[in-house]
Image (tube, grey):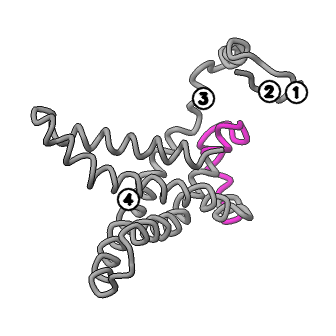
Amino acid sequence: QHSRSAATGNALSVAEAAKVIMGRPKGFWELYAGVGVAVVGSMPSVGLYFGVYSFCKKTFAKWEEKRPYMSRTLSIALSAAIGNTIASASRVPYEVVKQKLQTKAYASIGEAMKDLSLATLFPTGGIASQMLRDIPYAIVTLLTYEHLKGVWKPRAVAKFENVPSRAWDLLVGGLAGGVGSYATNP
């Protein structure tokens, strides 16, 4: 496994890349620059996303009763896409700040706060690129999650009665996220 050195363009081994990272002033912890911004910023965004997803899914379920040709798969996919589209508007600003902290464009959160403006927080193409990345992931992840929750989890709960139901929820969510990442990340 090799990565490229930004300075020289030469390939680095994993061990060489680890040496470079550990040689930085904050070492391993520099990988987590911007994590505070990501945590604080992701809470409202994820809450908005799941709120809109749940609302749309319930709304589409009512439509399915009246329109038998509308499939559950389409309802989940559309709900995921709509939820992600709306949440992207709240996600882009903190992603921009997080990435600028990680790339050292800002030395601190204080410096980032001084530079806040609409042009900084919503760069040209920022929402579009966020949506192009996140909507396919959300669709695959939630289709997988709903399928595993509806088909696989009941079978697992029945077969392994002594395992708590919440443990299966964690497993189903983790598997769905893994499938979504694998299927949509280049």
In the image, residue 30 sits, relative to residue 51, either above or below, namely above
Residue 73 falls in image quadrant: bottom left
The secondary element bearing badge 2 is classed as strand
Residue 60 falls in image quadrant: bottom left
Region in magenta = 98-119
Query: Disc 2 vs disc 3: which is toward the camera?
Result: 2
CB within 8 Å, label 1 to label 2: yes
Task: Give the class, few, some or many, for how many residues have Cα within 10 Å of label 2's Cα (few <14, many ≥20).
Answer: few
Q: Residue at x 86, y 27 (%)?
A: 7
Q: Decide which of 10, 89 is in the foreground and name it.
A: 10
Please name the amino acid that badge 1 sits on: Gly
In the image, residue 184 sits, relative to residue 120, either above or below, namely above
The residue tagged 2 is 4
Please name the amino acid that badge 4 sits on: Gly
- The mark nearer the N terminus, 2 or 3, is 2
Q: Which mark is residue 47?
A: 4
Q: Which mark is residue 31?
A: 3
Marks 2 and 4, Cα distance to the nearest angstrom?
37 Å
Query: Disc 4 vs disc 1: which is toward the camera?
Result: 1
Residue 56 falls in image quadrant: bottom left
The secondary element bearing badge 4 is classed as helix
